[in-house]
Amino acid sequence: MKTVSIILLGILLCIPVFGMDKKLNVPKQNFTVCIDPGHQAKGNNKTEAIAPGSTQKKAKVSSGTTGIGTKKPEYEVNLEASLILKQLLEKEGITVVMTREDHNVNISNAERAQISNNNKADMTIRIHCDSIDNSEKTGVTILVPSDTSKYTQSIYAESQKYAEYLKEALISKDIQVNGIFKREDITGFNWSQVPVIILEMGFMSNWHEDKMLSSPEYQTKLMESVVDALRIYKNSPAE
Ligand SMILES: [Zn+2]
């Protein structure tokens, strides 16, 4: 009887102690990143609302650009870099959700945003390449949702904060950054309920940069910057 009482007392005393111990040791590991490799093998010109409830419409998913030198389609470069990013993030213990791991898919930009929403991603990284009618133009461009649009006001601050960390991480690796630009016209931003950025990795319309964008070494350098910035973001206080 006495032994039973001691055991019961022990259990009663231990429960709160264990409870506290557990709370103190909860690691900040519950971090999910959604990676959206831009475009797909075939664009889809059918339209969808640019934002929830909007009458303004845009193509569900455009076909993207092609390398001036490599003749490679953008969707291939985007997925190559995204798969490197996935591997790097998983090594960090971060949960990764991919919108696609295949070229032969048909997922609209609004649907891609909903994949992030459904998975309650802490950050969405959309990987793209640029193109412009000026073969001299080079460098990375970061796009963020608008702070004035009613659709994205609530996700702007966190998106912008991450974009700034990313810019610093890229510059510290001697990568040219053209700037961070707010955009109201991007379906994948307007449907997003979680922080999101687009990383335009460089210009496929520039001969040299196009070649670099297909190099696994350069892709890795870019994606390491994304991870470095996420590491800082993950440990920063919420806005
Ligand atoms: Zn693109």
Image (cartoon, grey):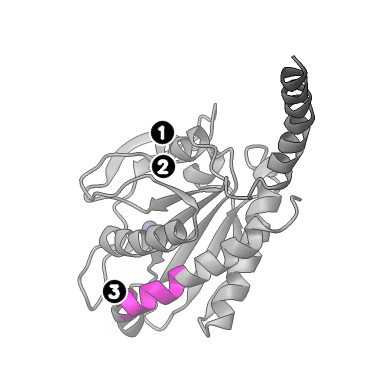
Which span of residues is magenta-colored? 212-223
Q: Horizontal placement of 214 versus 184: left or right? A: left
Reading the image, the residue beneath label 3 is 214
| Mark closer to the observer (1, 2) | 2
Q: Amino acid type of disc 2?
A: Asn
Viewer-proximal residue among 134 and 28: 28
- Disc 1/disc 3 C-alpha distance (Å): 31 Å
Asked if the residue under mark 3 is in contact with the one under mark 2, i.e. CB atoms within 8 Å, the reply is no
Reading the image, the residue beneath label 1 is 48
Q: Quadrant of residue 61?
A: top left
Asked if the residue under mark 2 is in contact with the one under mark 1, i.e. CB atoms within 8 Å, the reply is yes
Q: Is 220 within the magenta?
A: yes
Reading the image, the residue beneath label 2 is 109
Q: Residues within 10 Å of mark 3 (few under 14, many from 20)?
A: many
Residue 37 on image: x %, y %:
37, 54
Q: Pick whichever of labels 1 and 3 is earlier in the sequence.
A: 1
Q: Residue furthest front?
A: 2
Magenta span main SS: helix
